Amino acid sequence: MSHHEAKIAAGKKAAEWIADGMIVGLGSGSTAECFIDSLIELCKEGLKIEAVASSRASAERARKGGIAVMDINSVPRIDITVDGADEIDSEKRMIKGGGGAHVREKILAAASKEMVVIVDESKLVGTIGRAKLPVEVLFFGSPSTRKQIEEMGYKGKWRLQKDGTLFITENGNLLFDIQFESPPLSPEQDHFNLTQIPGVVDTGFFFRLAGRVIIGYPDGTTRVQ
Ligand code: 5RP
């Protein structure tokens, strides 16, 4: 519950930074949803923006609230993207993809003038890599791709849905969730190694993408880093 209040506080603060005429990238996950809800309230009060979304869930939530959600391929620019994270360190390196949307989230973040990250305190870590690292893998040849990932020494599992069937991303791909035995010494090197394997689309590591970070607290206050 307290995490929820903290997420609401962070989402509300980020929404205050949105101005008329902006094209806004919507992240995914429960913290991003708090931002979308605050944005909907501001739009009801007269704020005029357009949005692009990193997932169907975020697009639907925003549309239901009356926000115009555009096709990313039809917008001239993205002014700001607001998204959550599974882990973030003091250098603003992140692991994302708990919700399985990290590939689209990264595309939005990279296309934006700024990515604002909204988190509660539980997401701040000394070293990223305790959370599972999602690796998006093309279905075509996926057993061989998995074998190559494992031959590099990474251990993990295909992500499953609650009913035990394979989780398929909105891009039609699988997710191999890597569990590190201890946080990696060089996440950048791991990202490089993994993305060299044919069939790997991208990892959930985010480097040099985060702009301002808003940390929300259960008492409703926020801190900006
Ligand atoms: C989804 C994500 C989310 O931003 C991340 O999993 C954090 O989610 P939450 O805000 O629900 O804790 O990367 O792909």
Image (spheres, grey):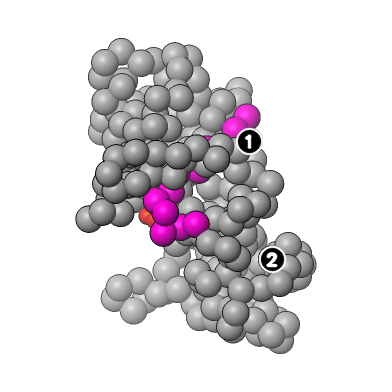
Q: Which residue shows up at 54% across the image and 48% down it?
A: 104
Q: Quadrant of ligand 1?
A: bottom left
Q: Main secondary structure of the magenta part?
A: strand
Task: State the separation of the CA atoms marked 2 and 1.
Answer: 22 Å
> Where in the figure is residue 2, as x and y percent of width and height?
26, 54
Which residue is painted at 39% across and 15% down in the image?
48
Q: Is residue 156 visible?
A: yes
Question: Mark 2 vs mark 1: which is more N-terminal?
Answer: 1
Question: Would residue 116 be counted in the magenta stretch?
Answer: yes
Question: Vertically, is 138 above or below 221?
Answer: below
Residue 5 rendering spot, x and y as whole percentages: 27, 46
* Type of amino acid under label 1: Ala
SS of the residue under disc 1? helix
Q: In which quarter of the image is residue 34?
A: top left
- The quarter of the picture where residue 165 lies is bottom left
Q: Residues within 10 Å of mark 2 (few under 14, many from 20)?
A: some
* In this picture, residue 16 sits left or right of residue 141: left
| Residue 36: assigned label | none
Is the shortest distance between ligand 1 and the CB of mark 2 under 8 Å? no
Q: Mark 1 points at which residue?
A: 111
Q: Which residue is drawn at 61% across and 53% down?
A: 90
Query: Residue placed at 60% from the left, 43% from the top?
Result: 210
* Residue on which the image places disc 2: 187
Q: What stretch is highlighted in magenta?
A: 111-124
For the N terminus, the image quarter is bottom left
Three-letter amino acid code of the residue under disc 2: Pro
Image height of 215 relative to 171, above or below: above
Q: Do the residues labelled 2 and 1 touch (CB within 8 Å)?
A: no
Q: Nearer the viewer, residue 32 or 161?
A: 32
Q: What element carries label 2?
A: helix
